[in-house]
Amino acid sequence: MSDINGDGHRTRRRAVRSAGPPVEGNETSTTTDVKTSATEVVSARAAVLGAGTSGPAADSGPASVDDADAVTEPDAVASAADTPADQESGVLAKAEAAAAPADEKENSGRRVPQLLALGAAALLVLALVCGATLSVFAVRSAEQRDAHRDEYVQTARQAVVNLTTIRADSAKQDIDRILSLASGEFKTEFDGRVDPFTSIVQQAKVVSNGEIVAAALESDDDRSARVLVAAKQTLTNAGQAEPQTRYYRFRVTVTRGDAGLSVSDVEFVA
């Protein structure tokens, strides 16, 4: 009996030592319950073995109690030790699983504004480039239009100066200068009249000088323009001792052709 009690005490001490230190909170109560249950089972089995066995069987009691210890104690302690850890691992796994979609949603929510911002920036840059390109073309177009208008006006001015400036000693050259800018109907008016006109100028000893008072563009397009020209002419001849001053207003039609600009028509404007 003393041996059995001794084995029982040893069993209790083993159970206590195997269980390890108590765990805080719910883990402490669970481990204490497991320890108590394991100790009671071992004590009961030891008492049964001691009461119902004699001789060699009694001698084998301690070995049977050790076997019970070997089977019961580790299982109970393992169950008591693993349960809280498993629960904690499960909770962490669930928390991670729940956090992953939230992180993905948050990252996705951040990417959308970033993509929108990049798209807006790209559109802004494209708009600036297009605006700058259009501005360059507009400036060039305006400069080209102004250059064409200036050419029309200058051609009309020169034609009127040529027409109102002529001298008896250079009549042939002066008429050729007029014809150099003439085209169309205006040039046709001189056909067959150059020689008679030259003779009249030389016989009357005409000396006239033309001067442009003002010139302005009336209308224009890519191929032609109408220019209003106001001119003053100072004229002397053999029948007048004093010079005469005359004023004219012309509507000059300037045409752009393959050979350049020319005067296709000249009208007197009252």
Image: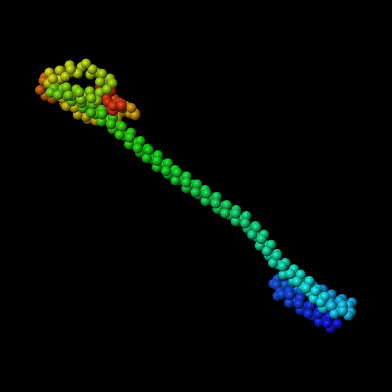
Extreme left residue here?
Answer: 241
In the picture, the quarter occupied by the C terminus is top left
Colour scheme in use = rainbow
Name the residue furthest bottom: 2
Position of residue 201 in the picture relative to residue 139 (left or right):
left
Q: Is residue 92 above or below residue 224?
A: below
Q: Is residue 255 visible?
A: yes
Q: Position of residue 181 (x, y in %)?
A: 24, 25
268 and 167: which is toward the camera: 167
* Coordinates of residue 240 in the picture (x, y in percent): 11, 21
Toward the viewer: 82 or 117? 82
Asked which quadrant contains residue 207, the reply is: top left
Camera sees residue 33 = no
Q: Is residue 34 above or below residue 204?
A: below
Q: Relative to residue 105, is residue 76 drawn left or right?
A: right
Q: How many marks?
A: 0
For the N terminus, give its image quadrant.
bottom right
Q: Indicate the quadrant where residue 244 lies.
A: top left
| Image x and y of residue 58, in percent | 86, 79
Q: Tell me: residue 170, above or below residue 77.
A: above
Residue under the point 19% across and 29% down = 211
Query: In the figure, residue 269 lies in which quadrant?
Result: top left
Identified at 45% across, 44% down, the residue is 126
For image coordinates 70% across by 75% down, the residue present is 21
Residue 222: horizontal and vertical position, in percent? Answer: 34, 29
Q: Residue at x 49, y 49 (%)?
A: 118
